[in-house]
């Protein structure tokens, strides 16, 4: 391995170790609190709550989404539900109307307009909202009936006017294929890391499925921004810049339909990554800025360095693993595919990367931390590692992050060309 390769590799290792061990220390610092924490469902006051359900061509799921809202355990006369049809070209609108008629849902109303995008649709709903709080629920997601109570109880318990958003714990709805099951693992880890990040007041995204907002604060900040692809992340950045707080309600569950095919997965992640880069660029003055506490010093730095780590990870994977394998496979044409001698001498086995004791030790530590988070994420979400998901664990650890890294790299190239993607 050349000197520059060694230097870059150790920089990547150092950054990865720093943030990984930091989160482990945060976990042990909060462990007793996590083990004893119980969400209350008792709400002393029953404030009026508005719920927005924006939909664009969601005919397959909108009925079930509205049903989950209808079944929320909360007085229906204290709910103001606005279902938004953002210029759908399918049967989304007629399905909305059919649901309201079938369930006699008098506290539901439909906001129908030409396509203008999610952020603009939510802003129109904000102007019509009657509640003290409002929640957004994506039209391919389903909320647990007790989640609203838990989140409102948390607002009451905190009793802090600077607490502006409470986020849910988002899980994958009924995972079936390998890709959805892998995302099931990923979302559980995201819940766990989000809980740790919440402890540091450093949450940087308010997920579209059922984050709960103070209406007056959002109005004060001018509603959702239309200049980024991830309005839920941009509003969280803006909250952090305005010194407002965001907390996670660790067991306020909401379930979302994850992509089950690679094209849909690619489109979703490309939008997420492009939006994330837009937000990081828009709020670049917060990076490493101690004025914003742990969010500026830790979270913003981590977010930005993550792009570099992804590039380096892909580069090293290609250089040390994938290219040697492809090279030997191509050479197989000349030896009648008697490939055993080549596997025996493959760089994957003989590479200095794996023979260097120090580097191998770091890899083992990082892998161990990943396994630790994997297990703790299941415990945190009160889930067991289902036997029917066992086959998904290997690609989750072996290939999934390389797949996401590849999409991130392509998104970064698009971002550099300032290419716009519609919602």
Image (cartoon, rainbow, N blue to C red):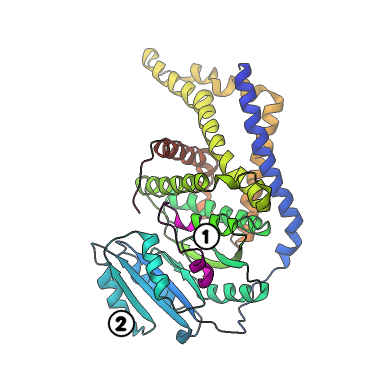
Whole-number angstrom distance, CA of label 2 to CA of label 1 = 32 Å
Q: Secondary structure at mark 2?
A: helix
Quadrant holding the N terminus: top right
| The disc label shown at residue 206, or none | 1
The residue positioned 66% from the left and 71% from the top of the image is: 160
Residue 370 located left or right of residue 314: right
Q: Which of the pair 36/278 is nearer the observer? A: 278
* Total tally of numbered discs in the picture: 2
Eyeballing the image, is 371 above or below 61?
Answer: above
Residue 336 located left or right of residue 206: left
x and y, in percent, of residue 377 in the image: 62, 55
Q: Name the image quarter holding residue 333.
A: top left
Is residue 365 highlighted in magenta? no
x and y, in percent, of residue 126 in the image: 42, 71
Q: Secondary structure at mark 1?
A: loop
Residue 169 visible from this viewpoint: yes
Q: Which of the pair 47/394 is nearer the observer? A: 47
Eyeballing the image, is 280 above or below 250?
Answer: above
The residue positioned 54% from the left and 17% from the top of the image is: 345
Is residue 216 highlighted in magenta? yes
Q: Residues within 10 Å of mark 1 (few under 14, many from 20)?
A: many
x and y, in percent, of residue 311 in the image: 51, 33
Closer mark to the observer between disc 2 and disc 1: 1
The residue positioned 65% from the left and 36% from the top of the image is: 15
Q: Which of the pair 390/109 is nearer the observer? A: 109
Eyeballing the image, is 247 above or below 407?
Answer: below
Please name the residue that numbered disc 2 is placed on.
102
The residue positioned 51% from the left and 32% from the top of the image is: 314
Does label 2 or label 1 sit earlier along the sequence?
A: 2
Residue 386 visible from this viewpoint: no
Q: Which residues are magenta?
A: 211-233
């Amino acid at each position: 391995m050349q000197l520059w390769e060694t230097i870059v590799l150790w920089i990547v290792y150092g950054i990865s170790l720093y943030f990984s061990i930091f989160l482990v220390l945060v976990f042990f610092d909060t462990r007793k609190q996590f083990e004893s924490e119980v969400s209350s469902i008792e709400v002393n006051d029953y404030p009026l709550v508005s719920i927005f359900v924006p939909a664009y061509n969601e005919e397959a799921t909108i009925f079930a989404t509205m049903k989950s809202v209808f079944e929320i355990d909360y007085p229906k006369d204290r709910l103001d539900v606005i279902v938004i049809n953002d210029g759908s070209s399918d049967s989304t609108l007629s399905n909305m109307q059919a649901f309201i008629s079938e369930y006699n849902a008098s506290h539901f109303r439909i906001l129908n307009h030409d396509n203008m995008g999610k952020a603009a649709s939510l802003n129109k709903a904000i102007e019509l909202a009657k509640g003290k709080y409002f929640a957004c629920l994506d039209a391919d997601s389903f909320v647990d009936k007790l989640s609203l109570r838990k989140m409102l109880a948390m607002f009451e318990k905190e009793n802090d006017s600077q607490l502006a958003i409470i986020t849910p714990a988002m899980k994958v709805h009924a995972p079936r294929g390998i890709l959805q099951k892998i995302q099931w693992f990923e979302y559980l880890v995201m819940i766990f890391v989000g809980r740790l990040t919440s402890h540091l007041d450093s949450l940087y995204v308010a997920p579209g499925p059922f984050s709960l907002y103070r209406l007056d604060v959002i109005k004060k900040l001018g509603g959702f921004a239309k200049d980024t692809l991830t309005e839920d992340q941009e509003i969280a950045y803006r909250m952090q810049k305005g010194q407002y707080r965001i907390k996670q309600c660790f067991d306020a569950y909401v379930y979302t339909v994850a992509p089950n095919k690679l094209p849909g997965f690619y489109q979703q992640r490309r939008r997420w990554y492009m939006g994330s880069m837009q937000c990081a660029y828009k709020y670049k003055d917060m990076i490493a800025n101690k004025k914003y506490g742990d969010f500026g010093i830790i979270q913003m730095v981590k977010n930005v360095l993550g792009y570099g780590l992804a590039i380096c990870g892909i580069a090293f994977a290609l250089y040390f693993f994938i290219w040697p394998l492809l090279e030997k496979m191509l050479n197989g044409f000349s030896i009648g595919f008697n490939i055993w001698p080549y596997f025996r001498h493959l760089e994957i086995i003989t590479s200095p990367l794996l023979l260097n004791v120090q580097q191998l030790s770091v890899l083992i530590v990082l892998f161990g931390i990943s396994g630790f988070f994997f297990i703790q994420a299941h415990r945190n979400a009160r889930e067991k590692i289902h036997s029917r998901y066992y086959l998904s664990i290997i690609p989750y650890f072996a290939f999934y992050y390389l797949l996401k890294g590849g999409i991130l790299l392509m998104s970064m190239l698009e971002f550099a060309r300032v290419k716009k993607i519609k919602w």
